[in-house]
DNA sequence: CTTCTCCATGGAAACGATTCCATCATGATT
DNA sequence: AATCATGATGGAATCGTTTCCATGGAGAAG
């Protein structure tokens, strides 16, 4: 348990001042002779600068925080892997927190990160915009991934911001802040249109986000199901799937049968209950779009329990292409979104923020057709 | 972006010295009057002590590191959730790293954690014992989870340590260091027996570990399969499954058909290749024990590809009870190990290390019989 | 009334790095 | 030859906390 060498030890051993050592090690100016000597001594002493001292001096911790709802959900596992990959190549540490989808826990974690002076954060948010104000105001660089906070809209005075009626903003073509993304998703009303729901009244935080093109993904899935003859299509969502639900409502078009849009609360049990309830209360439905892989899992289970065969009795499209989707029988047709890329991009974004406003990214989804959808019975 | 109040601000505002503030906040002695005043001021200023200053002063970061091979593997997701749950209740941060099963990346991560002065680490190790020497010697408190490092045994002079021929060491009955656990698993040779393999020559690190009772788990599975009439049973493992493989060899008993013990290298592709190769090269096998859920997944896929029906043509038992095991058809019979508990216990262990040697824990496994095993065809 | 003890208290050092600033040497320019 | 510009260098301040130590006052014991 020998204690590590400090910069002072190196300075003494090399016969220079600590300032010089610091400069050599962080690329400042120094004469070739000194540089070489210092480097040699440092190597010989196996010196590694302590992040503690540096962090204190610059009043910030390197690295980034990562907040996800549940690591047991394979999709968030993929997303985390992406973040970690980027962080690793940058040599930065990642502080992880799992919120369980609970805004309160999320707020706690934010507080903890603040205490640690972690000033960069990637989050799959569970709380509303309110929850995120403290983090932003404390000067954190935040990037949302997979989704962004819903706005409880305590006061509706904000007039609809007439954004440019943008076509799909895809990778390269540019990017988007939360407001742009909402507009893109058709959640924010077009200047003359009526708001779709309360969330549309959001005064969005000015935070970049990396999300999948849910609108297109859902639309494609719904069209596909329609093409198979399905009329009564249900949406099974979980917390944070508001955008997907909105996209679903838009895709099926008015009038929306609200009984066919149901939500679980996040746990597997609740997802199962929601799925089972849906199947039982509406035996007339012939297809389901699950807003996430946990919901999809629940749907398969519930269908089996009720002796509904897939796809004969009910067709199923699930969000997230997880490895086990192929193992089901029949293999599940899915809306794939690039979880790993999403994490990687978010990490890139949060790392190389030059201080200026960063723009978000929308990644494409892909409908992968396997065997869980068939013609309407 | 207002900057946070420091202890000095609080001191001034409360009209006391910084030392007093520190004492009040960390439970030192102070008069009730002062205590109250300081607390009030601190609350009013929304003061939160900076972890940076504290860490530097006490030359250690709070919290713990967590190193897993792959968060995309649901089991490690469960394990991580357990660790996070414990850390959360202790209010400690967790620094996460994913090693991809690569010893080199693992070593890098250890170096990074050292640089961060993270002195507590929970790891699912990928490298050999050698890899872990630096961490131990640097004074880190390490707890292994799920498995422990294999020893390459560069020098075999170490005589077999005649440990007490212990019965199963279960929770409560006590615990174990790496050496005890190895003995428990029958990997370390009984005094007169021949070593099973190179790993048996290990001079184990003195590091506690939280593992499942692989020996019992595998034994139960093999007996179950035997009971169904299976004679040719194969083991399909991945990196780090050496203990399970050893347990498998022991359970089937000599002579072991080594062609029926195959390993993938960690990626899903490699697992699939291993499974497919196994099925093709040995069409006479009638049952497979998969050492992990990724391997199980691969086995299901490979079997389907080769038109082998489960369980008609081949029976399958998989390690890890992941949610999707039930979704397969037939639902998979599994050896369940409590991933979440494992993580939680490991975190407890690493947190409340009183400096003394800690003892490890062996958690029970459970054979959950579903539908993937049938009588020998 | 004196002395002793104990506790609350605040000043200051320490932790290990970065960075400002002054100093000094060297070489170039007039 | 004198002055100036440039670049290397080291001392010292700084970050925010904990902790050591000295001080001072109050109450107890003599």
Image (cartoon, coloured by chain):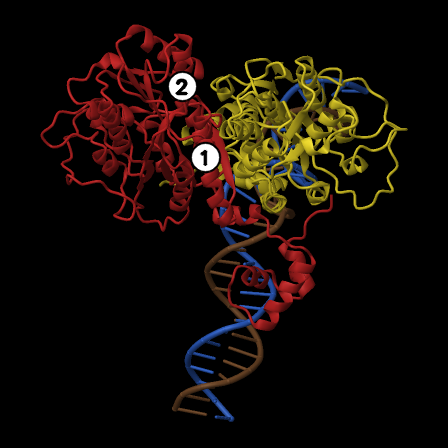
Chain colours: A yellow, B red, C blue, D brown
Q: Above or below — where is B335 with respect to D16?
A: above
Rendered residue at 40%/17% (across/down): B300
Q: Residues within 10 Å of mark 2 (few under 14, many from 20)?
A: some
Residue at 46% x, 27% y: name it: B324
Q: Residues within 10 Å of mark 1 (few under 14, many from 20)?
A: many
On screen, residue B147 versus residue A365, left or right, reads left
Q: Which quadrant of the view contains residue A136? A: top right
Is residue A42 shown to the viewer in this render? no
Question: Which quarter of the figure has residue A365?
Answer: top right
Residue B343 spot, x, y in % from top left: 42, 39
- Residue A202 is situated, as x and y percent measured from the top left of the image, at 79, 37
Q: Residue furthest right?
A: A192
Q: Which mark is residue A320?
A: none
The answer to which of A239 and A230 lies nearer the viewer is: A230
Q: Is residue C2 above or below residue C22?
A: below
- Numbered disc 2: secondary structure: loop
Q: Is residue B196 above or below residue A22?
A: above
Q: Position of residue A218 (x, y in %)?
A: 68, 21
Q: Are marks 1 and 2 in contact (CB under 8 Å)?
A: no
**Residue at the disc numbered 2:** B266
Q: Which residue is mark 1?
A: B78
Residue B119: percent from left, percent from top: 43, 41
């Amino acid at each position: 348990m020998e204690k590590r060498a400090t910069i002072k030890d190196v300075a003494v051993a090399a016969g220079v001042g600590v300032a010089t050592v610091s400069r050599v090690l962080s690329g400042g100016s120094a004469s070739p002779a000194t540089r070489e000597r210092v480097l040699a001594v440092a190597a010989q002493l196996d010196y590694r600068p302590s992040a503690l001292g540096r962090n204190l001096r610059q009043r910030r911790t390197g690295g980034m925080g990562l907040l996800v709802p549940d690591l047991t959900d394979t999709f968030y596992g993929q997303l985390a892997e992406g973040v970690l990959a980027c962080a690793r190549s940058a040599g930065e540490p990642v502080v992880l927190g799992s919120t369980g989808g609970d805004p309160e826990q999320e707020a706690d974690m934010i507080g903890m990160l603040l205490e640690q002076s972690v000033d960069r954060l990637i989050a799959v948010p569970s709380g509303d915009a309110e929850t995120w104000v403290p983090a932003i105001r404390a000067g954190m660089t935040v990037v949302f991934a997979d989704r962004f906070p819903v706005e409880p809209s305590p006061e509706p005075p904000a007039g609809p911001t007439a954004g440019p009626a943008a076509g799909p903003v895809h990778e390269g073509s540019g990017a988007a802040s939360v407001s742009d993304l909402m507009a893109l998703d058709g959640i924010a009303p077009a200047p003359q249109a009526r708001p779709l729901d309360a969330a549309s009244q959001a005064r969005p935080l000015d935070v970049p986000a990396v999300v999948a093109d849910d609108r297109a993904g859902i639309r494609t899935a719904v069209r596909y199901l329609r093409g198979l003859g399905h009329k009564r299509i249900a949406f099974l969502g979980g917390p944070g799937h508001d955008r997907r639900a909105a996209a679903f409502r838009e895709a099926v078009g008015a009038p929306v049968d609200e009984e066919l849009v149901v939500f679980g609360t996040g746990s597997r049990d609740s997802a199962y209950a929601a799925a089972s309830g849906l199947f039982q209360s509406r035996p007339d439905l012939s297809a389901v779009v699950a807003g996430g892989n946990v919901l999809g899992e629940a749907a398969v289970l519930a269908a089996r329990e009720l002796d509904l065969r897939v796809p004969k009795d009910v067709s199923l499209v699930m969000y997230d292409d997880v490895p086990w989707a192929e193992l089901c029988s029949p293999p599940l047709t899915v809306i794939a979104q690039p979880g790993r890329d999403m994490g990687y991009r978010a990490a890139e974004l949060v790392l190389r923020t030059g201080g200026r406003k960063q723009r978000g990214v929308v990644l494409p989804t892909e409908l992968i057709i396997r065997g869980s959808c068939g013609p309407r019975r």
